[in-house]
Image (tube, rainbow, N blue to C red):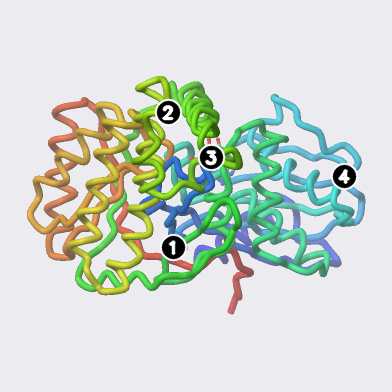
Amino acid sequence: MSEVQVLKEQFIELYGAESAHEIRVFHAPGRVNLIGEHTDYNGGYVFPAALTFGTTLVMRRRDDGMIGFASTNFPLRKQISITDIEYRAEDDWTNYPKGVIKELQDRGVRVGGYDLLFSGAIPNGSGLSSSASIEVVTAYGVLTMEGQPVDTVDISLLSQKAENEFIGVKCGIMDQFAVANGKKDHAILLMCDTLEYKHVPFKSGAYKLVIGNTNKKRGLVDSAYNERRAQCEQAVKDLQVKFPDLRLLGQLSLEQFMESQDLIQDPVVRKRAQHVVEEIHRVLHSVRVLEEDDLVGFGELMIGSHNSLRDLYEVTGFELDTMVEAALEVPGVLGSRMTGAGFGGCTVSLVHQDSVERFIEEVGQVYKNKTGLTADFYVCNIGDGVKEIEVG
Ligand code: ADP
Ligand code: MG
């Protein structure tokens, strides 16, 4: 039996077989950002790709104005009226899909009653965007069930709004955008201020993207994230002396930054801004080298990105640095870097297919010896964005 069939059986066990309505199945991927970290909220470029694993949603209409929430990943189940979609701490994970449903209602979408069963293959809280995945699959599922137009850019925006306002996490647009707009074997060059984007073929040839999960709990991440955002805003304020119209660091060219960085008073704030401006430059450079099939060049840019996140932006930490250093020791590795917000979560490495087994073995061992933690590895392919799954 296929995984989808198994899930449908589970759905029927939970909610019963009796219904006048059909069961439909949707899927949204997780995402990995290949390069361009902490540039999104600065109106810069990011370069994420959707993964081939993500969150599946099995869904069926019901006629009593209630929504049933269940997940194979969490024991908590809920039945909530469509007229009572509010944030409640004790509702735990269901707040994510509820936030999206509330946002759809606020936009005037008539949301019916449904039974929902989610099933995620993305490790939660590891920076592979399980939250964006569950949000985007909910929005796509509801809009499709209601026969509404499905615009994946719009879905990313409303999902981000739900996460910002309903959940209260100040994430940028990248995660939801990548999950909603991914394309098989392509990365997405996304300009986070204007949402202009293009799909760039990621022809990795004999090389594989390998994600390493540090399994380090991201303790400090929220406060440090907010602090970095505030520092970037401070840099903009300082630079407005020379550039009165500047709103976001991403609007500065590398040359403009180099000429005017002394206007930034605090040396720590200056370092933060330097990372942002140079990282945006690295993203654009990455697209150029990939268009020339220069994977070695791309690997070097990945390493440069990690070093900058370590030394200038200071968001890596011992675990991520250890994993990246160990990765770069393995022959056949072109590049390695942290991905996501930092302080824990995952690394992404570009590894020759013949070295993948050795990579997992050696990096896992060194990482365990130095940190006492056991890493997980995922050899990944780039998949499509959110869609309805055809069940044959
Ligand atoms: P991530 O880096 O994975 O996005 P977050 O902390 O932002 O980490 O989001 C993880 C949270 O999203 C989970 O704790 C849970 O509340 C919710 N979530 C994600 N996937 C699922 C799922 N399949 N079922 C239920 N809740 C999920
Ligand atoms: Mg998240």
Number of marks in the rendered image: 4
Type of amino acid under label 1: Thr
Badge 4 residue CB within 8 Å of ligand 1: no
Q: Is residue 282 visible?
A: yes
Disc 3 on helix, strand or loop?
A: loop
Q: Which residue is mark 1?
A: 52
Disc 2 on helix, strand or loop?
A: helix
Residue 26 percent across, percent down from the top left: 63, 63
Mark 2, other Cα within 10 Å: few <14 / some 14–19 / many ≥20: some
For residue 301, the mark is none
First in sequence: mark 4 or mark 3? Answer: 4
Please state which of the two labelled residues, at mark 1 or mark 3, is closer to the viewer. 3
Q: Nearer the viewer, residue 138 or 203?
A: 203
Disc 4 on helix, strand or loop?
A: loop
Please state which of the two labelled residues, at mark 2 or mark 4, is closer to the viewer. 2
Q: Which residue is mark 2?
A: 263
Badge 1 residue CB within 8 Å of ligand 1: no
Residue 235 percent across, percent down from the top left: 48, 30
